Amino acid sequence: MKTIDTIYTRIDYEKKSKFITILIPIRRIEEVTMNLEHYKVTYPKANHYCYAYIVNQDKGMSDDKEPAKTAGAPLLNILEKEQLTNILVIVIRYFGGIKLGTGGLIRAYSHGTQELLKTCPLQTLIPGLLVTIQFPFSLEKKVIYLLHNSKIISKQYKTDCLYTVEISEELFDRIQSIVTVQSIQKILIEKTD
């Protein structure tokens, strides 16, 4: 699976309609609604806010009042075909007064996404874990050394160290003998060399 690491935008015109395509990296389904609300405020006079997303195993789409399967489904098809995850595509349309027909809508909504994906760098994701680990202060240097290629989400210091990290399953197998695992969740993480 692959994903993007930053937001990419493209503007296209088709028979006087303006299409703004936005690719957004996301990690949770809740971010779909948050991003839609943001772009509805950013582009308040648009006629349609069509979208598709894939987050881990969850998928969704919306034609936002366009004819059925002319916007959301083609967008989702592209994401699936490219084997993407943790991604949201929103295509904002300002209607230009000329109807495009079913085929025209499918092409117009798909075009920006396809073109953006040709130019933006994709990151490879591998199965990983989001874990919260606890360990004594005396082991912190050793744990930090072991986590050097992992993403540390948060650190808390109380009577012990409490870290929330994204790690590979292989590293988890090595580190779990020296830490106490508080929580664990399967996720996809960025592949490191």
Image (spheres, grey):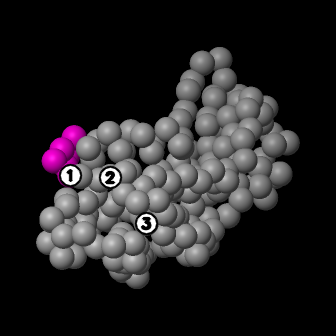
Q: Which mark is residue 70?
A: 3
Who's the residue at 45% across and 45% down the image?
32
Q: Split into 4 quadrants, where in the image is the N terminus?
A: bottom right
Q: Mark 3 or mark 2, which has the lower sequence index?
A: 2
Q: Secondary structure at mark 3?
A: loop
Who's the residue at 45% across and 52% down the image?
62
Residue 86: x percent and y percent? 54, 56
Q: Which mark is residue 82?
A: none
Q: Mark 1 or mark 3, which has the lower sequence index?
A: 1
Q: Residues within 10 Å of mark 2 (few under 14, many from 20)?
A: many
Q: Which residues are magenta?
A: 41-46
Residue that carries the numbered disc 2 in the rendered image? 49
Residue that carries the numbered disc 1 in the rendered image? 46
Q: Secondary structure at mark 1?
A: loop
Who's the residue at 77% across and 50% down the image?
172
Residue 45: x percent and y percent? 16, 47
Q: Could you say which is closer to the camera, residue 187 or residue 153?
A: 187
**Which SS type dominates the magenta stretch?**
loop
> Which of the two marks, 1 or 3, is nearer to us in this view?
3
- State the image quarter where residue 28 is shown: top right
The amino acid type found where label 1 is placed reads Ala
- State the image quarter where residue 113 is shown: bottom left
The amino acid type found where label 2 is placed reads Tyr
Q: Secondary structure at mark 2?
A: strand
